[in-house]
Image (spheres, helix red, strand yellow):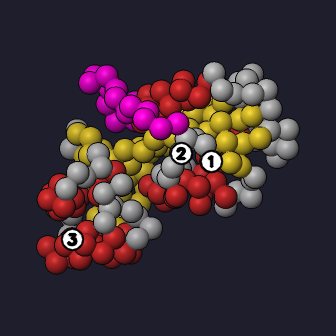
Amino acid sequence: MLEQYHVILASNSPRRKELLAGLEIDFEVKTIKGLEEHFPSNLREGEIPLYLAKQKMRAYSHLIQSNELIITADTIVWKDNGLMGKPKTKEDAIQMLKSLSGDTHQVYTGVCVKSKEKEVSFVAQSDVRFATLTDEEITHYIERYKPFDKAGSYGVQEWIGYIGVEHINGSFYNIMGLPIQKLYNVLKEF
């Protein structure tokens, strides 16, 4: 699969790199520094990461060579009709995890795949139910795992996911940042 393409993952995320490597595809990671992640305020839920993934792709479009295939992605956490971004401070992280505790939220990932000839984009949704977390559990997780680069202040593949996630409806890998099974099926179209 994809022998005719040099695959480029346009992401700094170590989790996306790990997941794409799991497909046993040779790829290279390339990023453009300073990409702004702004979106129109009227966008909701899955529209946001899809818009951002397409924006990232636009930044790469002029660089695509005839033998290249580029993958961009963006993941958000959505709860109570609002976006939960990456926490800026320890207090932000605490508040986010308290908000997720004992409740269900959604994780959306927008993905864009592009070659010179073709572009395919999609959104994946996963619903995540968290157990009620104690203040001590939240503090331990933030101090030990420092989730400041993660939407919603958590990584499902880390300790907090082990002790906190009661139920998932959708792709586990989507919550990590790349709905890899769905991406695999899209890649087969190229």
**Neighbour class for label 2 at 10 Å: few (<14), some, many (≥20)?**
some
Residue at 55% of width from left, 49% of height from top?
179
Q: Which residue matches tag 3? A: 138
Give the CA distance from mark 3 to mark 1.
Answer: 33 Å
Q: Amino acid at mark 1?
A: Val
Dominant SS in magenta: loop
Give the CA distance from mark 2 to mark 1.
Answer: 7 Å
Query: Does any portion of residue 45 appear in the rendered image?
Result: yes
Residue at the farthest right position: 4
* Of residues 160 and 102, the one drawn nearer to the viewer in this rendering: 160
Instruction: Say which of marks 3 and 2 sits in front.
Output: 2
Does the magenta segment cover residue 36? yes
Q: Which residue matches tag 1? A: 29
Mark 3 or mark 1: name the one nearer the start of the chain.
1
Q: Amino acid at mark 3?
A: Ile
Mark 2 or mark 1: name the one nearer the start of the chain.
2
Query: Does any portion of residue 171 appear in the rendered image?
Result: no
Q: Position of residue 72 (x, y in %)?
A: 56, 38
Q: Amino acid at mark 2?
A: Ser
Q: Quadrant of residue 3?
A: top right
Are discs 2 and 1 less than 8 Å apart at CB? yes
Q: Which residue matches tag 2? A: 11
Q: In the image, 79: left or right of 57?
A: left
Instruction: Say which of marks 3 and 1 sits in front.
Output: 1
Does the magenta segment cover residue 10? no
Residue at 33% of width from left, 70% of height from top?
145
Give the magenta-colored segment's residue range: 32-48
